Amino acid sequence: MSDKMLAETVMIDGHQGDQIEAYLAHPADDTPTGGVVVIHHMPGYDQATKEMVRRFAANGYAAVCPNLYWRDAPGASPDDAAAVVRAAGGVPQDRLLGDLAGAAAHLRALRNSNGKAGVIGHCSGGRQSFLAACMLDFDAAVDCYGAFVVGPPPANFATSMEPLLPIADRLSCPLLGLFGADDQYPAPAETEVLEAELTRLGKTFEFHTYEGAGHAFFAVDRPSYRPAAAVDGWQKIFDFYGRYLAK
């Protein structure tokens, strides 16, 4: 497999046809491939997230990250845009889902698309990935330590959000969950509740919890980075997408 790719900032159709900025990367050849919508974390549409987009392209997938903060602070730095969005209480759910649906449609319209699209997110993006897997048409979803799926955030948290456990019955695609045993949001007890509910509902999923890892263990630019957990997690992500997106 060649890792030759094309990567660029593009404009895509988001919620209600709005044009929003997104970062797109895909293999340079015309071999049919699956697509991955990468949801940026709460700190915003940053270089670390764009690097993940390129990593998917280097491994044979088309990938796109929509800038979910584009309307709120176009052209602002990721930190400034995130501050604006936090002050406003977060991204409205209907707009979020519309933007993610638009990103998936953009991937499926690429000339080398095989018609399949997955979604992945870390932290707040992990929660949003689970939400998208319940509310939109995806072929596979990855939740990397998404908080507040089972319970609400604490009263002093920056944004308010409702638990997603009540809509778990709407999960419409296979789900991979990657978590840290030392995480607080979500704590292992919460992921156990979600695991039990998905098992009761007969959903297709697999969860992995890493000892010695806390929140954001994939983040190479943070003290929370745990190389062994991140390397194994990436392998599980590509194995998972290989089963559900590559054919």
Image (cartoon, helix red, strand yellow):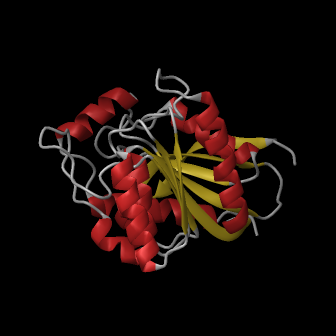
Residue 68: in sight, yes or no?
no
Give me the residue at 69% from left, 46% from top.
Answer: 235
| Closer to us: 240 or 28 | 240
Q: How many marks?
A: 0
Q: Position of residue 226 (x, y in %)?
A: 56, 29
Determine whether 246 is above or below 221 in the image: below
Q: Position of residue 247 (x, y in %)?
A: 76, 70
Residue 137: in sight, yes or no?
yes
- In the picture, measured across the screen, residue 183 lies left or right of residue 173, that is left
As drawn, which residue projects farthest toward the top? Answer: 223
- In the picture, measured across the screen, residue 141 lies left or right of residue 188, that is right
Q: Position of residue 170 (x, y in %)?
A: 39, 77
| Closer to us: 197 or 239 | 197
As drawn, which residue projects farthest toward the right? Answer: 1
Give me the residue at 48% from left, 76% from top.
Answer: 172
| Closer to us: 177 or 75 | 177
As drawn, which residue projects farthest toward the left? Answer: 155
Determine whether 1 is above or below 224 in the image: below
| Closer to us: 7 or 182 | 182
Q: Quadrant of residue 72?
A: top left
Q: Position of residue 147 (x, y in %)?
A: 34, 48
Q: Quadrant of residue 76?
A: top left
Give me the residue at 75% from left, 43% from top.
Answer: 58
